[in-house]
Image (cartoon, rainbow, N blue to C red):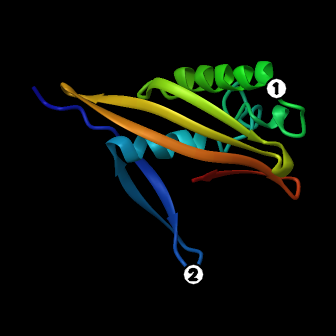
Amino acid sequence: MEVKKYVDISPIRDSAGNVHYSKEYDVNAVNSSIMNLFSIERGEVPGKPWLGNPLSIYLFENIGYFEQRSIEIALRNTLELYEPRANIDYINVNVVNQNNEIEINIGYYIILGSQEIFEDLKFKYSHNNMTSITQRI
């Protein structure tokens, strides 16, 4: 039986500003896909109103337990809908109110053949000068 590999194409910008494309495989492909998914604002893609980052509505809000659970559910729903390769194990949300940042930790695994590969992806989401930034930690 042939082991299924995940392959995505990823743009890379060099120091001169030229864009080159490279292939990413397996866990790196899924990580890049998740980061790209959360770099798009909800409603930004025509015809796909639920594609993208569900976090922007929570910035500048007083976030308590209920809102934190809502963020976790929104992230899980987005990932299950748009990144089915990632089997979500857990999602942890930490809100840093003084910096208007939301720190996200996503634990997931992918299945390649009979092997499960676990990955722990951490990133933070913040609002900086009218621009939303998703940054991998």
Q: Which residue is at 88% across, 53% downward?
A: 130
Which amino acid type is marked by label 1?
A: Gly
Quadrant of res 82: top right
Label 1: which secondary element: loop
Left-right relation of 94 to 12:
right
Mark 2 to mark 1 CA distance (whole Å): 45 Å
The disc, 2 or 1, on the residue closer to the chain's N-terminal end is 2
Residue 118 in the image, given as x and y percentages of width and height: 35, 34
Left-right relation of 80 to 57:
left
Q: In the rendered image, which quarter contains the N terminus?
A: top left
Placement of 69 over or under 40, stated as above or below: above
Residue at the far bottom: name it.
16
Quadrant of res 35: top right
Q: Which residue is at 43% across, 50% downward?
A: 9
Quadrant of res 17: bottom right
Residue 28 in the image, given as x and y percentages of width and height: 39, 47
Q: Which residue is mark 1?
A: 64
Which amino acid type is marked by label 2?
A: Ala
Label 2: which secondary element: loop
Q: Which mark is residue 16?
A: 2
Count every numbered label the image shows and give the total.
Answer: 2
Left-right relation of 24 to 91:
left
Q: Which residue is at 70% across, 24% downward?
A: 50
Seen from the viewer's position, the closer of residues 94 and 5 is 94
Q: Which residue is at 59% across, 22% downward?
A: 76
Q: Tell whether label 1 touches label 2 (CB within 8 Å).
A: no
Seen from the viewer's position, the closer of residues 25 and 122 is 122
Q: Residues within 10 Å of mark 1 (few under 14, many from 20)?
A: few
Residue 125 in the image, given as x and y percentages of width and height: 71, 46
